[in-house]
Image (tube, grey):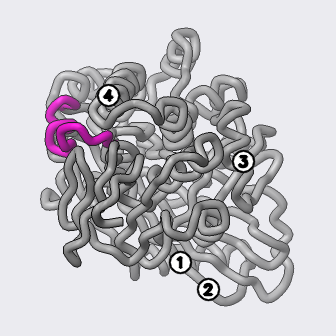
């Protein structure tokens, strides 16, 4: 592509970048695009999950390109409070993400195994010296940390298990928080991927971004043993995600932005601050870009930056909940915040996860017995939080 200007160059072939490429291929096949990813596969090694109610009709249609695991209903468990819910739940593995994108996108649009040395409003410079010149550039490379923001961390280890006999699990357990907390909000997340396949993930809302693989693996062993699930591990996944409770979003944008380049995904701040869910926001952003694909690079970057600031404004409530959860009471009490959410009617829960809670929803969740001591909550709302820098661990 050296010497030729394409329409849109996307740096980063993870969820956010890949969905933009897909949306453009579906709605604007006339455009020339480049999707550049340092890794060997698009999407890396991840599993993304979401509630069916998170996406509108257009977003659901976009995701139909992928092979998705679906369930009608799910369960949650808290001490003395188990509940089954009827909302549909979906999950996508990165291998299926990669395969579908390679089937849909032109082969010359995908550039995997290529390290990006630099980028600017006019294109992407690869480490091997190649320049991909473009009318518009999108940066979807994610972030290492976010020192301008405050909060805690969601740390997890997931195991894909093939059981020796059918496990009998027919629906996901999104949050089994009726387990030992180990100094954090801990829950176990289980997806039945087949009659003899389970994905079991041990997750922590922790103060530091420390992932102890040996400890988490041992706890998964004991959880599986307690449920009678015997078999072999065929894959695993780890992650350390920010849980955002506040900070200076303008400073975050400056630190992760490049003039004239549209920053999307976590790099742009498109994430649910309390749950760390990204897929619904990645879908919304991809569709917005596809609908504005004729904008010049600077106009596209300004439009996306405005959307990010609006999302920061409308998700303030979830950061408030996060400040109370992390800043007040003992870590073992953090599960009470999610227990309050899951005692609500299903539409309230759906809007909570989609970051669309109404004023009435917000009042319902916080009314009654608070999830943390009142004085501690008030103190947490006025004190600065811990910067989200991994070096702080």
Residue at mark 2: 233
Which of 90 and 342 lies nearest the eye of the viewer?
90
Work out whether residue 87 can be spotted: yes
Q: Which residue is mark 1?
A: 236
The tag earlier along the polypeptide, 1 or 4, is 1
Helix, strand or loop at mark 2? strand
| Distance from Cα at disc 3 to Cα at disc 2 | 24 Å
Q: Dot 4 corresponds to which residue? A: 299
Q: Are marks 3 and 2 in contact (CB under 8 Å)?
A: no
Q: Which label lies toward us, 2 or 4? A: 4
88 sits to left or right of 353: right
* Measured Cα–Cα span from mark 1 to mark 3: 21 Å
- Residue 229 location, quadrant: bottom right
Name above or below for residue 12 compared with residue 365. below
Answer yes or no: is residue 324 visible: no
Which one is nearer the viewer's eye here, 160 or 367? Answer: 160
* Start-end of magenta stretch: 248-263
Q: CA distance from mark 2 to mark 1?
A: 7 Å
The quarter in which the C terminus is drawn is bottom left
Which residue sits at x=45%, y=32%? Answer: 294
Tell me the residue at 72%/83% (across/down): 162
Q: Earlier in the sequence, mark 3 or mark 2?
A: 3
């Amino acid at each position: 592509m050296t010497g030729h200007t394409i329409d849109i160059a996307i740096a980063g072939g993870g969820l956010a970048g890949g969905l933009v490429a897909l949306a453009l291929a579906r709605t604007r096949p006339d455009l020339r695009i480049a999707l550049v990813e340092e890794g060997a596969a698009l999407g890396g090694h991840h599993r993304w999950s979401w509630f069916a109610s998170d996406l509108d009709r257009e977003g659901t249609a976009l995701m139909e390109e992928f092979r998705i695991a679906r369930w009608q209903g799910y369960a949650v468990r808290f001490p003395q409070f188990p509940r089954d819910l009827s909302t549909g739940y979906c999950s996508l593995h990165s291998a299926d993400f990669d395969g579908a994108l390679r089937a849909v996108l032109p082969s010359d649009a995908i550039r995997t195994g290529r390290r990006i040395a630099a980028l600017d409003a006019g294109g992407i410079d690869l480490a091997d010296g190649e320049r991909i010149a473009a009318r518009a550039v999108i940066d979807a490379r994610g972030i290492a940390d976010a020192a301008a923001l405050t909060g805690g961390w969601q740390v997890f280890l997931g195991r894909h298990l093939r059981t020796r006999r059918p496990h009998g699990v027919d629906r996901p357990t999104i949050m089994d928080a009726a387990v030992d907390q180990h100094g954090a909000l801990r829950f176990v997340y289980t997806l039945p991927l087949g009659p003899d396949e389970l994905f079991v993930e041990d997750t922590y809302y922790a103060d530091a971004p420390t992932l102890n693989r040996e400890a988490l693996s041992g706890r998964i062993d004991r959880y599986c043993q307690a449920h009678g699930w015997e078999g072999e591990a065929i894959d695993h996944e780890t992650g350390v995600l920010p849980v955002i409770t506040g900070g200076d979003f303008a400073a975050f944008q400056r630190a992760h932005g490049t003039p004239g380049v549209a920053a999307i995904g976590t790099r742009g701040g498109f994430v649910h601050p309390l749950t760390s869910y990204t897929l619904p926001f990645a879908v919304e952003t991809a569709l917005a870009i596809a609908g504005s694909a004729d904008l010049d690079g600077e106009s596209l970057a300004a439009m996306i930056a405005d959307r990010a600031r609006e999302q920061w404004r409308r998700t303030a409530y979830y950061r408030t909940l996060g400040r109370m959860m992390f800043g007040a009471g003992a870590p073992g009490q953090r599960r009470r915040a999610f227990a309050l959410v899951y005692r609500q009617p299903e539409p309230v829960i759906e809007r909570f996860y989609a970051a669309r809670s109404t004023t009435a929803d917000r009042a319902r969740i916080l009314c009654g017995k608070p999830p943390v001591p009142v004085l501690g909550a008030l103190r947490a709302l006025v004190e600065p939080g811990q910067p989200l820098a991994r070096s702080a661990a």
